[in-house]
Image (cartoon, coloured by chain):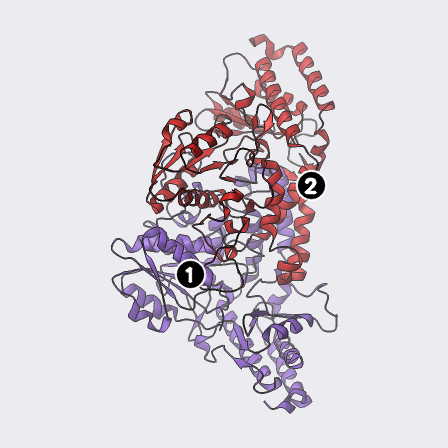
Chain colours: A purple, B red
Amino acid sequence: MSESAVSSPAIRTALAIRAAELDASDELGKVREQFVLDTGSGHAADAPGVYLDGNSLGALPAAVPAHVADVVAREWGELRIRSWTESGWWEAPERIGDLIAPLVGAAAGQIVVGDSTSVNVFKAVVGAVRLAGEGRDEILVDEGTFPTDGYIATSAARLTGCTVRPVPLDSLAAAVGPRTAAVLINHVDYRSGRLHDLPGLTAAVQAAGAPGVWGLCHRAGAPAGGLGAHRGVPVGLDAHGVDLAVGCTYKFLNGGPGSPAYLYVAARHQAAFDSPLPGWNSHVEPFGMRPEFVPVDGARRGRVGTPDILSMAALEAALGVWDGVPVEAVRAKSLALTDFFLECVAAYVPEGRVSVLTPLEHDARGSQVALRCDDASDVMAALIARGVVGDFRAPDVLRFGFTPLYLGFADVERAARVLAEVL
Amino acid sequence: MSESAVSSPAIRTALAIRAAELDASDELGKVREQFVLDTGSGHAADAPGVYLDGNSLGALPAAVPAHVADVVAREWGELRIRSWTESGWWEAPERIGDLIAPLVGAAAGQIVVGDSTSVNVFKAVVGAVRLAGEGRDEILVDEGTFPTDGYIATSAARLTGCTVRPVPLDSLAAAVGPRTAAVLINHVDYRSGRLHDLPGLTAAVQAAGAPGVWGLCHRAGAPAGGLGAHRGVPVGLDAHGVDLAVGCTYKFLNGGPGSPAYLYVAARHQAAFDSPLPGWNSHVEPFGMRPEFVPVDGARRGRVGTPDILSMAALEAALGVWDGVPVEAVRAKSLALTDFFLECVAAYVPEGRVSVLTPLEHDARGSQVALRCDDASDVMAALIARGVVGDFRAPDVLRFGFTPLYLGFADVERAARVLAEVL
């Protein structure tokens, strides 16, 4: 806590020992071997980098390069058009959706992968307004929303005759009512890492007779692109009766840069889900070339155009790292990593140099730590130059993402130490 | 022409010699070496396959596998988040758009790559309605439209207070008027391969004060995803004053399965283009996290969410095959290939067994040949079993796509011969 602590060898030694002990007893420690980490990244071999930006772009799972190469060279290059049936290309959006489902607490058949997060937010918000029915004309969005959600919600409102009203989440229950057509809420605040109360807010929205749309991940934070915790238990979409949800796959799901997003439509809403983007892929008879649009049943109704196979291939291979990984363990390690990082920061960083924006209560914490710091931009540049890669968020926030699948406690201790040295 | 012609060795020899001569003098013959063709496709080595389905999925350009592998292993695996700036990921949608521009007769700065064709049709049609201004409430679509365009146009109409009216293209000039908000036209009819009159129809639509949206390629046909010909000259989007256009990249541009589509917004419309999908990528300050949406100028205004980098990488490498290829030569070879195919079919196939749906006039022909045949489904299955891969279109159409970059005249002669044998 004090200035002298920065250089206290005893504290450093004690924390390094703690890190080694935590790593030794980490049941997820072996999962790290399934990722490509710090090969040729330009950092000195004796000081490997610490990648704390998995909340922007997940690291490369080791299985991805060979699978993508096979899809390119054999499935596309040799089988060509036959791969739509013979290599399972056609079913990829739902098949990969079903791989994501257990990670967000959903039964199979409710998630489809494809398009960007923003495009899926558009489908979900317009779809929610239509589910809500006539006579409702207000779309509520949480005041601190990730901006692109607000832009898309505003467009959805303009096209459906609604207006958008930003509200602080702590007054959402009072704000919803008979005019509410849809509510768009982020699970994790992208700045602070605060985890919102999904069960409580979902119930409040539904009590007003409106569907809620949850943005699960692109504001970062929760491991597994939407896992959160409520008293230590991973929050399930099905268990809490969520209506619609959208998540991205390039952060904690490690699908690669700009990998396709996913759309969850609860089974009970699927028959009435009325997409504003009814492409041929969501037609009941996609190869029938019918002039009339008749939507297919099930998750496929959320599709639009031709699935983007190369990106889907990378994502499908990337999801293999979750085989046999209990989501509860991921959440527990996420909290342990962020706890330990905060402890190391408190021990190493001169008092008053940074302030912690991330909630200290576990129930309210995602998988990221945000620190306010006057010269955050310069500090992040210096950190990155030393191999500790986080995010700068204007004007004064250092954001560090903690990915339990490939980060260890020694990484966390080193990151805090480098931060203290930079500061 | 007669039944006996099927087995006439003299005719076969003459056509084989013609094919060899045409191949020998083909200035595009060398481009074929830049593609992966018939390696390990399961066909007997002495009878390599003929891929006549490049209008569904283009063959694999040889440069793609290594480039994709580098983007995965080095740019993502090693540089990770730094690649958004250091590997040019951020600018990819416009950079690749500028590679497509010369192929469709557009100056740089008007094409952006990303999202599926259907999503781009939605942006373009809603954008067109908004460009048309108040008081116009009818979206015209050509009667024979590729169905997904009609589904999306209908959704766009529903969301903008318009109605959709299908019209036959030969009466379009009479149908447009003061109520016309937008017109969606396919450049090439996906069934017959008929090439529509882009300059004339564009002028007719604009005379009514409405913008036209051209669907350039996913109904297949024209080489280069939108190249057509008007008296032998490739049709340019800029030269004919096209307003908006959408094309796909996985057919004649060989971008890979489900590779991202592109959107052309003429420079004169860019400042007023008002996208229904205003994502953070089209914000003037995408990293500013501003609550208000302020659109960026230029082609980037057509973006929505995070660009899909792996698919963009494959497409960018694929476009390299166009280096030094004059588009006029591609159009000329396309016509020569389809002419020669029709000639071989006439010589080999028993009279009356098939009828030609594709226009014989060059001005009206895309780069495909459609043949009507009572048992088309069985015939196509038999062709594919023998390595001649085309498309079956219900109920009775055999569709063959001719890709001048990697098809030769000997391929065409062999395909017609196998067709005659199957019939």
Tell me the quarter of the picture where residue A110 sits: bottom left
Residue A49 visible: no
Q: Nearer the viewer, residue B30 or B378?
A: B30
Indicate left or right for B186 with A41 as reference.
left
Q: Dot 1, how many residues are within 10 Å of its Cα: few (below 14), some (14-19), or many (20+)?
A: many
The percent coordinates of residue B371 (x first, y second) are 51, 21
Quadrant location, the N terminus of chain B: top right
Quadrant location, the C terminus of chain B: top right
Q: Which residue is mark 1?
A: A150
Disc 2 from disc 1: Cα separation: 43 Å
Secondary structure beneath dot 2 equals loop
Secondary structure beneath dot 1 equals helix
Chain under disc 1: A
Q: Amino acid at mark 1?
A: Gly
**Mark in front: 2 vs 1:** 1
Per the rendering, the mark at residue B62 is 2
